[in-house]
Image: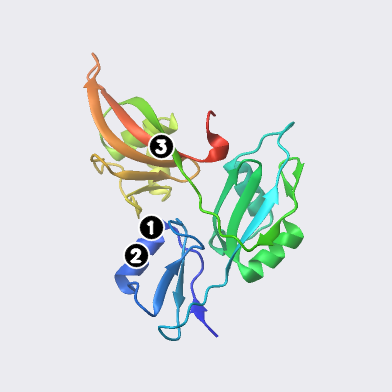
């Protein structure tokens, strides 16, 4: 029997690597090169290449009802399964790809049959496709480079709401969960906001007459979200 973790997000991986660095006997695997969510897999020897990660695929007809990442996540949560039981998933050209363990894959093939108002049918596939992220530049005006001001600008909410999100552990800078809203956001910091997305801070490019900051961010977008 092999030992392995659940799927870890980027912040959890960062913490895990400080205690369990990758080696010939320890692999961090998400099913494909560049995966964001990964398992820690403990191998028996240097020749061992064990991984129980599989890829599921479903075709979706979006002619009358378009779905997105949140719809897929909502349908997964409706099945009352833990977020750590599946890895990366995305929508690409009317196909959904989802990485999970072999055992959970069997459960999802049998039970993951509906997303929003669309019927879906997942199957395990031999290929391990790679998620391709596209980007767009987002321009915002914010009060300062404090974390709460940055989050408020990106989420389009009040700073008090942004502070609540930070204190609830929903925001990470460079994959480290923020604990205080007054941390300064520096150039090239990766900002992860749960339920909103991933951003890279490109920097301030102007000041407004009211002494607010005009700033630019690079946002990761998936194939199904382009143009939205």
In the rendered view, would you say 172 is above or below 138?
below
Q: In the image, what residue occupies the spot 51% across and 41% down?
A: 222
Work out how far the residue at label 2 is from the one at label 1, CA to CA, in angstroms.
6 Å
Relative placement, left or right, of 178 versus 203 is right
Q: In the image, what residue occupies the spot 65% across and 46% down?
A: 95
**Whole-percent x, y for residue 137 in the image:** 38, 30
**Whole-percent x, y for residue 7 in the image:** 50, 64
User: Which quadrant does the C terminus fall into?
Assistant: top right
Front position in the image: 191 or 35: 35
In the rendered view, would you say 88 is above or below 66?
below
In the rendered view, would you say 117 is above or below 97?
above
Front position in the image: 168 or 173: 173
Is the residue marked by circle 2 packed among few (<14), some (14-19), or many (20+) residues within 10 Å?
A: some
Q: Are marks 2 and 1 in contact (CB under 8 Å)?
A: yes
Q: Secondary structure at mark 1?
A: helix
Q: Are marks 3 and 2 in contact (CB under 8 Å)?
A: no
Work out how far the residue at label 3 is from the one at label 2, CA to CA, in angstroms.
24 Å
The tag on residue 15 is 2
**Quick one: label 3 or label 2, which is nearer the N terminus?**
2
Relative placement, left or right, of 45 versus 63 is left
Q: Provide the residue designation for mark 1.
A: 11
**Whole-percent x, y for residue 66 in the image:** 67, 34
The tag on residue 219 is 3
Q: Secondary structure at mark 2?
A: helix
């Amino acid at each position: 029997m092999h030992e392995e973790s659940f799927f870890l997000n980027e912040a959890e991986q960062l913490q895990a690597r400080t205690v369990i660095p990758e080696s010939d006997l320890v692999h961090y695997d998400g099913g494909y090169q560049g995966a964001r969510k990964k398992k820690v897999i403990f191998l028996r020897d240097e020749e061992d290449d064990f991984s129980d990660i599989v890829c599921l695929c479903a075709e979706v007809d979006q002619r009358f009802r378009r779905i997105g990442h949140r719809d897929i996540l909502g349908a997964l949560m409706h099945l009352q399964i833990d977020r750590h039981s599946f890895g990366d998933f995305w929508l690409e050209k009317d196909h959904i790809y989802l990485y999970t363990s072999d055992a959970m894959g069997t459960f999802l093939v049998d039970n993951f049959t509906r997303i929003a108002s669309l019927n879906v049918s997942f199957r395990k596939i031999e290929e391990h496709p790679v998620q391709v992220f596209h980007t767009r530049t987002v321009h915002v005006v914010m009060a300062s480079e404090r974390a709460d001001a940055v989050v408020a600008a990106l989420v389009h909410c009040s700073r008090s709401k942004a502070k609540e999100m930070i204190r609830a552990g929903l925001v990470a800078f460079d994959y480290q969960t923020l604990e205080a809203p007054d941390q300064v956001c520096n150039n090239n910091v990766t900002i992860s906001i749960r339920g909103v997305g991933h951003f890279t801070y490109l920097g301030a490019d102007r000041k407004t007459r009211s002494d607010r900051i005009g700033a630019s961010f690079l946002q990761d977008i998936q194939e199904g979200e382009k143009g939205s």
